[in-house]
Image (tube, rainbow, N blue to C red):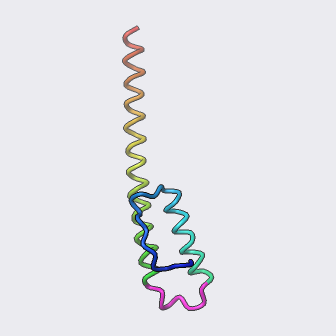
Amino acid sequence: MKDKNKQIDYQTMSIEELTREANEIIDYLENHENIENETDIYQKLLKLDNFIGKKFQSNAKSINLKTKEKILNISSKKNAN
């Protein structure tokens, strides 16, 4: 973790990018000697975890809606024949 205070816009990041960022934080914490004073890093990791969960739910909901639309479209074409 080169710059633990860097500001990142999580809104614009993909789930993969967010996961990569979380893994970097975990690697940093695992390899750091004195992590007791790294509460800001832990909080950043918790924030990332929460954001990844919300983004995953949003993506899952979007996929579900698109799938339902496609099924309805296929069904309506099938019923029209």
Viewer-closest of 4 and 44: 4
Residue 77: image location, x then y, percent:
40, 15
Residue 2: image location, x then y, percent:
56, 78
User: Is residue 34 located in the magenta-colored stretch of the structure?
Assistant: yes
User: Is residue 50 located in the magenta-colored stretch of the structure?
Assistant: no
Locate the C terminus and report the quarter of the image it occupies. top left
* Image quadrant assignment for residue 10: bottom left
**Residue at the image position 52 percent from the left and 60 percent from the top:** 17
Viewer-closest of 48 and 72: 48
**Residue at the image position 40 percent from the left and 40 percent from the top:** 64
**Residue at the image position 41 percent from the left and 27 percent from the top:** 71
Image: magenta residue range: 32-39
**Residue at the image position 56 percent from the left and 74 percent from the top:** 26
Number of callouts:
0
Residue 40: image location, x then y, percent:
43, 82
Residue furthest out toward the right:
31
| Magenta span: chief secondary structure | loop
Up/down of 14 relative to 40, above or below: above
